[in-house]
Image (cartoon, rainbow, N blue to C red):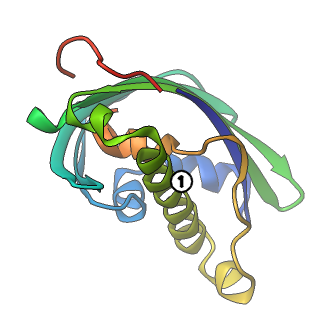
Amino acid sequence: MEMSGEQLIAVPQNEVWRGLNDPEILKSCISGCESIEKVADNEYKVAITAAVGPVKAKFAGKLVLSDLKPPQSYALAFEGSGGAAGFAKGGAQVSLAAEGGSTRLRYTAKASIGGKLAQVGSRLIDGVAAKMADDFFKRFNETMAPKAAAAAPAEAPVRAGLNPLWIVAAIIAAMLVANWLLGPPRYIW
């Protein structure tokens, strides 16, 4: 599956960069995220509980950041396993650009899943993924700019295709986050 999206965040670029690299902020913004633990300079261990239709599982995985160009962009690779529920793996490119006093965050991602998750069906997964992405951006905006978020509703993500980066990260990072791992995939988005 390939997806992309963008979000306008009402804080300066350096602050958005800081928030995207702060495990505690990310943990509070990713639905079902139980822990994000830094294990190396650019590597994180993630645990998330997620439900997709009848499949509910705790996912464990890792997230690795690369090609860091603070505060403009980075790439991330993720892989995660939920035991019998399945696995997810993929990668994403995230970029930030100043836009007035705000920051435009853009991302593109590719992901694959397998196991019971793949059997649930893409429509159900897409709906859950879109909701998790929307929830993540709402929480991230509220966390990063609480006064701005209270004064005006958060801008809805602009979608080109589907928008489930953070569910994938959650299914690690799973996004999402998680990660973002068991045998060959039986289903690829």
Neighbours of disc 1 within 10 Å: few (<14), some (14-19), many (20+): many
Residue 35 image point, x, y percent:
22, 52
Query: Who's the residue at 42% across and 23% down the image?
Result: 90
Q: Which residue is mark 1?
A: 130
- Residue 69 vertical position relative to residue 82 in the rendered view, above or below: above
Residue 176 image point, x, y percent:
43, 43
Query: Who's the residue at 28% across and 60% down the image?
Result: 32
Q: Nearer the viewer, residue 4 or 43?
A: 4
Q: Amino acid at mark 1?
A: Ala
Which quadrant of the view contains residue 12? bottom right
Residue 28 image point, x, y percent:
37, 65
Residue 130 image point, x, y percent:
53, 53
Residue 39 appears in the figure? no
In this rendering, position of residue 105 left or right of residue 29: right
Number of residue marks? 1
- Residue 145 vertical position relative to residue 66 in the rendered view, above or below: below
Residue 14 appears in the figure? yes
Which quadrant of the view contains residue 80? top left
- Residue 125 vertical position relative to residue 115 in the rendered view, above or below: below
Q: Nearer the viewer, residue 117 or 182?
A: 117
Query: Who's the residue at 61% across and 42% down the image?
Result: 162
Query: Who's the residue at 79% across and 60% down the image?
Result: 102
Identity of the residue furthest to the left in this view: 84
Per the image, label 1 sits on a secondary structure element best described as: helix
In this rendering, position of residue 111 left or right of residue 107: left
In this rendering, position of residue 53 left or right of residue 135: left
